[in-house]
Image (cartoon, grey):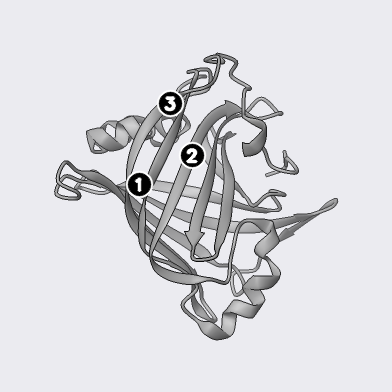
Amino acid sequence: MNAPIYQQALGTDFARLQPELQDYFSLAPGSGQYGVGEGTFDVVGCRQRWLRPLLRLTGGEQAFFPEYGENIPFRIENHAHHDPFGRSSLTARREIRFPGRTRLFQDTTSATGHGGTTQLVDYVGRYRRLVTDLNLSVTPEGRLRGVSEASRLFLGPLRIPLPRALDAKAYAEQWWDPAEGGSGRHRIQVKVIQPQIGLVLVYAGAFDYRLRPYTGGSPARSFLPRYAQPDRWENRV
């Protein structure tokens, strides 16, 4: 199936999204285009100072980072493609431009079959070692909500489910704000919360979004620019 993965996962609820969100999540493999968003995070990063040294140890994973800032410019690219295992996927690559340092945050969301329905599985970081299930819903206002569930780590041959007491959940909401920026902009808010220590990571802001053609307009469903590819792919769920 070459339908956009968020449409596969939401089914008929996809039509309940705001029209601008439907456009945003309609990128499909083989379209010859990718999405580019540019804007500003009102807040982004880790607010808890004591936790930042620990996050600094994971900075190279391109998943978490120790900085915190306000009014921070950022750029996101969305690439729809088939991963090396044939799954329809969406890879997101974010550049968060803190003063003096740009942090990368990347992940690949893949569509998998689960009990006759489509389940989205998110592979986080440059090595795709952290994996979570994404549960999606649409609010009465047409916003998209997502919650990460059942995180696990893949370390070599080991699959390590994180116990509930240690797991951190990401709560995300995205919507179109027609009053933002004069002609309307996308808004996003994400909070990563760990039950023992509270808020680990937050980012919230607004951005403009457009589609651009790949150089040469590559129609291959497996095409993903080299700079957007992870250092390692993961097939296990």
Query: As shown in the figure, which amino acid type bears the numbered disc 3?
Result: Arg
Viewer-proximal residue among 194 and 77:
77
Read off the residue under disc 2: 77
Identity of the residue drawn at 69% across and 42% down: 230
Residue neighbourhood size for the residue with mark 1, other residues' Cα within 10 Å, grouped as few (<14), some (14–19), many (≥20)? some
Q: Comparing marks 1 and 3, which lies closer to the viewer?
A: 3
Q: Is any part of residue 237 visible from this angle? A: yes
Read off the residue under disc 1: 137
Read off the residue under disc 3: 212
Query: As shown in the figure, which amino acid type bears the numbered disc 2?
Result: Glu
Residue 63 to residue 123: above or below = below
- As measured in the structure, the alpha-carbon distance from the residue carrying label 1 to the one carrying label 3 is 28 Å
Identity of the residue drawn at 58% across and 48% down: 106
Would you say 83 lies left or right of 37 here?
Answer: right
Q: Comparing marks 2 and 1, which lies closer to the viewer?
A: 2
**Pointer 2 or 3: first along the chain:** 2
Query: As shown in the figure, which amino acid type bears the numbered disc 1?
Result: Ser
x and y percent of residue 197 in the render?
53, 81
- Secondary structure at numbered mark 1: strand
Residue 29 to residue 102: above or below = above
Would you say 16 lies left or right of 215 here?
Answer: left
Q: Residue furthest front?
A: 100
Residue neighbourhood size for the residue with mark 3, other residues' Cα within 10 Å, grouped as few (<14), some (14–19), many (≥20)? few
- Secondary structure at numbered mark 2: strand
x and y percent of residue 133 in the render?
55, 49
Identity of the residue drawn at 44% across and 52% down: 74
Residue 12 to residue 56: above or below = above
- Secondary structure at numbered mark 3: strand
**Pointer 2 or 1: first along the chain:** 2
Viewer-proximal residue among 141 and 179:
179
Identity of the residue drawn at 49% across and 39% down: 77
